Image: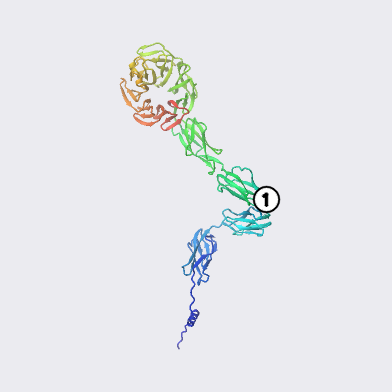
């Protein structure tokens, strides 16, 4: 038996068929034209929290109003088919609502945050009085300061007494309507509340307002001061508004109906103004100045070697970093040991000027920091004579002579420093021994006369006078003699004195072969001098002279017929090296062999001083050039003297004593110098 197959038509199709059969048209589809997401853009949600999105689809009679929800980054936030979004991690995504035909959509940003809910809320001021028709502003403060909670609502218990207008930043404007009292309640989005008691009085308008105190001391950053306003008449009902002309410098926080707290925000000035609701005002100037709390230095102690690396730069740091006064000054407790001065970059340049200890102090805003310096000698003592008439050793004054005694040159013999001086009061040349902080005069030298004038061997003339003017002093370790050279005014000649350190005997001579004697040297047991010659015996022999200090009187003369032809035509210095005499003459060094045969080496500028080390000849010219042989080492403008010890080249002049690039500043310009191995 066959089983029949019955096909059942769906009801909707059947009805459509029947309608069609009856001649009724199919309804037209109404398409979606617009979609709007109902939540704010952006909307926030906590990590792990949820927020429900909804969408408005237009037109209202759209055939299919369904939407599909999606998230641009599901690792940050997800959203389900019902529009419920869940925060996964901090970040921002775009939430999209799309129509069923996918041709119409809307977007909204969703920020996923770590939510810090409020733990408390307060209102400032906690109570106010406002006149009918006047307004006052109150503000909510949410705790903690970084809370993500916000003010959800403001409510007046009696709107007929005072009406409210919420403002931005958690503030609310209160307007008095009728006399009476009401309570204003603020509520956060997590349900916390605080109240402000409001009293509305019948208006009594202010005719003026004043502020106290009359002046406010400077505030530190973060410091506070309280201002109090008083309206005239005393019963005035106007509300008050507080403002700062520069909130970056000072901010205001109302405390009560007539008081305000001012807080320093940054260094500067601001004007605080209180204004009544009917336009009366008063002002108070506020200065914010963060004080210095401390000063530190880049180091607290340091050690220098006087004739080595003897300079550095110190840095001072002022705290706090926002202190207004940042002008640091630097001082040295002993400028004879350490010289300190401020650089353009604000740091301190520190320079050794002598052996000893000194403290450099940095000062700012009444606070100080210090660095203690110890300056040591490096086995070398450097003595110099300055223009004030003092003998200085390594930057420290050894002896300051009386004004009529002028030290002119120094030498060392047996470890003792000798200085020769001109006594302008007595007209005599004086010799002294120089110790650490004292001197000892050689009385026998002061009282010595000049035995005669040496012309040639063996002729001498009788005693002609006493020592008069000294220019040079020299000692040779191979004998006991100290040589002093100068001038005898009475004889009109050059003069030299020989002081025997072993016996104490002093002999003085005048020589007609020179008018002035400026330097000495000893070669093979014979002593030689260098000096200047004028027309004393032979007018054809005006000029420079190199001669022996013994009776042989051998001479090397440069000779000019007239001094006016070359007033600088004289020998300024003389040394001995390798069997030769080297003499400084004009712009040359004259090398003289044992037969007095000369050879010349020329330089740029007159040669002032000579020195020798390891067979090398050093010289200093009046242009400040320092040479070894004919190789220029460096230039020291204003230099007046030269010494070489253990390969170290020392130069003095122009207010400084140098060893290479290291130098020591001196209180007054140095003229002559002596370098001694300790």
> Residue 147 at what x, y percent from top left?
57, 55
> Residue 15 at what x, y percent from top left?
50, 80
Q: Is residue 195 left or right of residue 363?
A: right
**Residue 529 visible in rendering:** no
Quadrant location of the N terminus? bottom left
Residue to which mark 1 is pinned: 236
Label tally: 1
Q: Colour scheme used in the picture? A: rainbow
> Residue 442 at what x, y percent from top left?
46, 18
Residue situated in front as seen by the camera: 27 or 341: 27
**Residue 248 visible in rendering:** yes
Q: Is residue 599 above or below residue 309?
A: above
Residue drawn at (63%, 43%) of the image: 214
Badge 1, how many Cα within 10 Å: few under 14, some, many 20+? many
Residue situated in front as seen by the camera: 319 or 189: 189
Residue situated in front as seen by the camera: 530 or 306: 530
Q: Is residue 40 above or below residue 635?
A: below
Quadrant location of the C terminus? top left
> Residue 274 at what x, y percent from top left?
62, 48
Is disc 1 placed on a helix, strand or loop? loop
Residue 536 position by quadrant: top left
Residue situated in front as seen by the camera: 536 or 63: 63
Q: Is residue 218 left or right of residue 71?
A: right
């Amino acid at each position: 038996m066959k089983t029949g197959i019955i096909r059942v038509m769906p009801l909707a199709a059947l009805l459509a068929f029947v309608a069609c059969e009856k001649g009724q048209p199919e309804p037209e589809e109404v398409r979606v034209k617009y979609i709007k997401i109902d939540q704010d853009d952006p909307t926030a949600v906590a990590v792990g929290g949820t927020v429900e999105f909804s969408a408005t689809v237009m037109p209202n009679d759209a055939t299919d109003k369904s939407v599909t929800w999606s998230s641009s980054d599901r690792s940050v936030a997800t959203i389900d088919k019902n529009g419920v979004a869940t925060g996964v991690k901090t970040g921002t995504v775009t939430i999209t609502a799309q129509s069923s035909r996918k041709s119409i959509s809307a977007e909204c940003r969703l920020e996923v945050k770590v939510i810090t809910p409020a733990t408390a809320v307060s209102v400032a001021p906690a109570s106010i009085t406002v006149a009918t028709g006047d307004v006052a502003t109150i503000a909510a403060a949410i705790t903690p300061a970084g809370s993500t909670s916000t003010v959800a609502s403001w409510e007046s218990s009696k709107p007929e007494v005072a009406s409210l207008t919420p403002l931005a930043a958690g503030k609310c404007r209160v307007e008095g309507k009728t006399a009476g009292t009401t309570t204003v309640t603020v509520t956060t989005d997590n349900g916390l509340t605080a109240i402000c008691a409001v009293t509305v009085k019948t208006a009594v308008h202010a005719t003026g307002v004043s502020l106290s105190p009359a002046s406010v001391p400077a505030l530190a950053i973060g410091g506070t001061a309280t201002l109090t306003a008083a309206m005239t008449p005393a019963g005035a009902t106007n509300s008050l508004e507080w403002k700062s002309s520069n909130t970056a410098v000072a901010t205001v926080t109302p405390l009560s109906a007539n008081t305000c707290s001012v807080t320093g925000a940054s260094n500067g000035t601001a004007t605080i103004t209180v204004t009544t609701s009917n336009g009366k005002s008063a002002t108070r100037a506020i200065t914010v100045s963060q004080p210095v709390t401390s000063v530190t230095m880049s180091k607290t102690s340091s050690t220098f070697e006087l004739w080595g690396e003897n300079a550095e730069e110190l840095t001072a740091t002022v705290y706090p970093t926002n202190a207004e006064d940042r002008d640091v000054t630097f001082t040295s407790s002993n400028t004879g040991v350490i010289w300190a001065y401020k650089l353009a970059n604000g740091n301190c340049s520190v320079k050794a000027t002598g052996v000893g200890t000194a403290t450099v102090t940095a000062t700012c805003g009444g606070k100080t920091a210090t660095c203690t310096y110890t300056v040591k000698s490096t086995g070398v003592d450097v003595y110099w004579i300055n223009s004030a008439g003092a003998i200085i050793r390594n930057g420290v004054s050894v002896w300051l002579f009386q004004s009529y005694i002028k030290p002119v040159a120094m030498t060392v013999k047996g470890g003792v420093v000798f200085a020769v001086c001109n006594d302008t009061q007595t007209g005599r040349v004086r010799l002294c021994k120089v110790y650490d902080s004292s001197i000892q005069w050689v009385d026998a030298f002061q009282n010595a006369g000049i035995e005669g004038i040496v012309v040639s061997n063996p002729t001498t003339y009788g005693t002609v006078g006493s020592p008069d003017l000294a220019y040079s002093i020299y000692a040779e370790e191979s004998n006991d003699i100290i040589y002093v050279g100068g001038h005898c005014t009475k004889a009109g000649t050059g003069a030299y004195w020989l002081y025997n350190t072993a016996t104490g005997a002093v002999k003085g001579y005048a020589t007609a072969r020179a008018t002035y004697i400026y330097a000495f040297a000893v070669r093979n047991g014979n002593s030689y001098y260098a000096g200047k010659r004028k027309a004393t015996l032979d007018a054809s022999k005006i000029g420079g002279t190199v001669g022996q200090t013994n009776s042989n009187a051998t001479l090397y003369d440069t000779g000019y017929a007239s001094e006016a032809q070359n007033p600088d035509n004289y020998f300024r210095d003389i040394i001995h090296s390798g069997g030769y005499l080297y003499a400084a003459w004009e712009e040359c060094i004259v090398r003289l062999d044992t037969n007095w045969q000369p050879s010349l080496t020329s330089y740029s500028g007159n040669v002032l001083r000579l020195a020798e080390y390891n067979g090398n000849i050093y010289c200093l010219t009046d242009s400040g050039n320092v040479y070894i042989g004919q190789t220029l080492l460096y230039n020291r403008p204003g230099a007046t003297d030269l010494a070489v010890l253990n390969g170290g080249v020392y130069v003095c002049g122009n207010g400084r004593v140098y060893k290479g690039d290291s130098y020591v500043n001196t209180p007054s310009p140095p003229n002559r110098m002596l370098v001694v191995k300790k």
